[in-house]
Amino acid sequence: MYFVVDRFVYAARRAVAKSTNAIAYSAMSIALSLSGKVALISGGSRGIGAATVRMFAAAGAKVVFSYRSAADQARALSKECGAAPVQCNLDHPEAARLLVAETVKRCGRLDILVANHGVWPPDDVAIERMTDEQWRSTVSINLDAVFGLVKHTVAQMKAQPSKNGVGGHIVLISSTSGQRGEAFHSDYSATKGALISLAKSLASELAPAGIYVNCVAPGWVDTDMSAAALEDPKTGDAIRRTIPLGRVGKPEEIAAPVLFLCTEYAGFITGEIFNVNGGAVLVG
């Protein structure tokens, strides 16, 4: 009898404790903060990049972002959220080195790299008709420049004092195309697939230095780069039919997972491919 009563009392006490904890958690505000961090976001003047710049600045980071030709948008974004724009044509590793150096010159350190810049040639091109120039251009922008950004960012992160045991965060923006391929866009798919392999390789290599490396893989997102395809009634409808959620993503819906991966709440995540594509990668 006493055993039965004791079990009842124990269960009741656990229920009260769980209820109290639930109330405490529901009343607690959890902020995704990057206070005191310096972030470099490539391709930050428009689309996913601009959304990421805004979100990182709102989270307290000091943000430097690159742009190639969208000077008006870059100036407006800088005025809006205080981020620092740097004009840079990221098409080779040396340009990446100079961008990293400029960031460190302005801010004194570098804690976060988001390699977001890239090009998606919009015309369908069969492999036997793809020019050497198109292949080299896509690879130089989407892969060679990312290599340069990562190389020089890692060197800086290792040279500077870590914060709370964290050496830094690197997030590479890949694509569903890099996982399942994309007919007539083999140059783009090859580079985005390479970024996934790069992230996985670097995650294990850099973990001892406290540097986290992850990928975010968007699908179709409502940006300038995809506008022509999405606005065409025929291709737009076809694209939406391939997405289980029935719509394309918003830039902010990609930026938010990028932000999360650079906070303390992602402290046990590295080498991961975050699919943010409405389930499209599951059915392609």
Image (spheres, grey):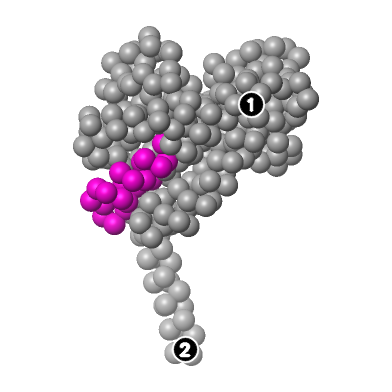
User: Is there CB contact under 8 Å for labels 1 and 2?
Assistant: no
Residue 138 on image: x %, y %: 58, 26
Q: Is residue 200 magenta?
A: no
Q: Which residues are magenta?
A: 149-169
Left/right placement of residue 66 relative to residue 35 reads right
* Rendering coords of residue 78 (x, y %): 30, 18
Q: Which residue is mark 2?
A: 3
Residue 203 appears in the figure: yes
Task: Give the quadrant of the C terminus.
Answer: top right
Q: In the rendered image, which residue does mark 1 sit on?
A: 135
Compared to residue 32, the image places residue 72 above or below, namely: above
Q: CA distance from mark 1 to mark 2?
A: 75 Å
Q: Quadrant of residue 196?
A: top right
Badge 1 local density, few (<14 within 10 Å), some, or many (20+)?
A: some
Residue toward you, 101 or 80:
101
**SS under mark 1:** helix
Residue drawn at point x = 65 percent, y = 29 percent: 187
Q: Is any part of residue 28 visible from this angle?
A: no
